Image (cartoon, rainbow, N blue to C red):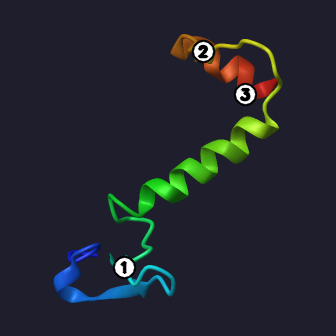
Amino acid sequence: MLHCRDPKYGFLTYKCSECNTTKAVPLVCKSRICPQCGKRYADKWVDELVDRLFAVPHRHMVFTMPEELRALFEAD
């Protein structure tokens, strides 16, 4: 992960058979915790989550209750 996308630690070379141009593509670690590779996993997760949500505007809110009332809500 420390050397992700660093061509000094490995790369693949592609060559066009028609124009003979070459392109070097550095190797990646594909780790979820890598700042560069992990973004791909996060983007995929977000896309899947968006597909499951309703197509309506919404907001997320968190409500709390006083400590004195928590026992009442836990009982019923």
Residue lying at 52% horizontally and 16% vertically, measured from the top left = 67
Disc with the residue nearer the chain's start (1 vs 2): 1
Mark 3: give few (<14), some (14-19) or many (20+) Cα within 10 Å: few
Mark 2: give few (<14), some (14-19) or many (20+) Cα within 10 Å: few
Disc with the residue nearer the chain's start (2 vs 3): 2
Residue lying at 62% horizontally and 18% vertically, measured from the top left = 60
Disc with the residue nearer the chain's start (3 vs 1): 1
Assess whether mark 1 and mark 3 are in contact (beta carbons under 8 angstroms).
Answer: no
Residue 31 quadrant: bottom left
Q: Is residue 28 left or right of residue 62?
A: left
Total marks in image: 3
Which residue is labeled 1 in the image? 21
Q: Between label 3 and label 1, give the one nearer the viewer.
A: 1
In the picture as drawn, the residue positioned furthest to the front comes out as 19
Q: Which numbered tag is attached to residue 35?
A: none
Q: Which numbered tag is attached to residue 74?
A: 3
Residue lying at 28% horizontally and 76% vertically, measured from the top left = 1
